[in-house]
Image (tube, rainbow, N blue to C red):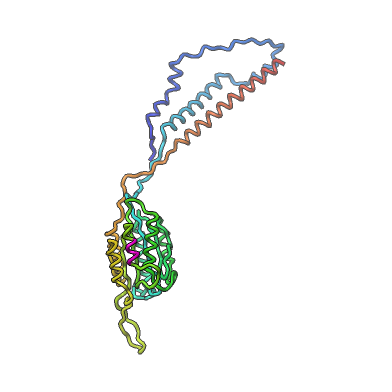
Amino acid sequence: MWTLAWPWMLLGLPLPFMVRRFLPPSNETNESGLKVPSFVLFSILINRPSAEQYTNWRLWIGLIAWCLLVLASARPERIGDEVEIPVSGRNLMLAVDLSGSMDAKDFELGGRRVDRLTATKAVASDFITRRKGDRIGLILFGEQAYLQVPLTLDRETVKTLLLEAFIGLAGEKTAIGDAITLAVKRIHDQQEEGTKQVLILLTDGANTAGEIEPLKAAELAQNIGLRIYTIGIGADQMVVSSLTGGLRRVNPSADLDETTLNEIAEKTGGRYFRAKDTSSLQEIYRLLDDIEPVPEPEAGFRPVQSFFFWPLGLSLIISICLALMNLFENGGLSRMREAIRQ
């Protein structure tokens, strides 16, 4: 939609007509005499248009320049479509375990058996897509913790790099404490007053590597107001083939340290969740949407783009052209006078 920011400036359009109508005409005349031996030198003026003809078209061009100038002063603007801007987002870090145990195929996705990391990628990607307005970061950890994506509003980049992660990228062991510490450092460096800080940590084991104990790292998170939600992933039973050729039931999540994960969440004001299959993992992320809701969009915001510089520029170009034409003609008359004198 096009509009004018200052439409009252259009009242200046009739100003040249009012000046011409109400101000008295100039009475100044140029009285001069010239003696010439012959009229030969005046033959060049026979086909020259009269001053009145010049005045007519120059007057119209000048009026066009004036209209453009008045239009520019009214500041034409284009109002774009409504844009949803979050009232207030949060800093949300995702920490995903890439240790060797995440290769266990105890989840189902699309009717086929998949490993834990593949299921995590599918569910977490949908979760990231829904987090419009939050700054999201990604930490991948195993034996070491790495910042894969710093906090950003670019959700597509976070999803892409999550999908490109693979088991063993950060080592075979699990450094839960180091992952929490890295999240604390990155969030603390970009902490803003009034912004919520959240870490969602997903793992299928216990802390078996790293330099910092998980509970000590949780204390650091508590000090900066970082709320941690922990997710323990892995089925509680699985049917596998035995050495004798039969089938037996095993617990593939025997190494999961639920006690520590629960203490981390309680210490920081978060919650611990247990994901035993794909549907429960999806439900956990939906619960996280409810617990940490996406900020409501601010209705009624429309981007405004100003275009006053186009009519202003055209008016300036026309004015310069008229001025150059006057200078050129004045110079031509001067040369003719010099020729007559000679």
Could you say where residue 93 lies in the image, as x and y percent from the top left? 36, 60
- In which quadrant of the rendered view does residue 225 lie? bottom left
Could you say where residue 39 lies in the image, as x and y percent from the top left? 69, 14
Residue 132 visible in the snapshot: no
* Residue 182 position (above or below residue 234): above
Main SS, magenta residues:
helix
* Residue 115 position (above or below residue 324): below
Q: Nearer the viewer, residue 140 or 62?
A: 140
Could you say where residue 152 lies in the image, as x and y percent from the top left? 40, 56
Residue at far bottom of view: 244
Q: How many marks?
A: 0
Question: Within the magenta stretch, is there residue 29?
Answer: no
Which quadrant of the rendered structure holds the N terminus? Answer: top left
- In which quadrant of the rendered view does residue 180 lie? bottom left
* Residue 179 position (above or below residue 100): above
Q: Is residue 322 left or right of residue 278?
A: right
Residue 288 visible in the snapshot: yes
Q: Is residue 282 left or right of residue 99?
A: left
Which quadrant of the rendered structure holds the C terminus? Answer: top right
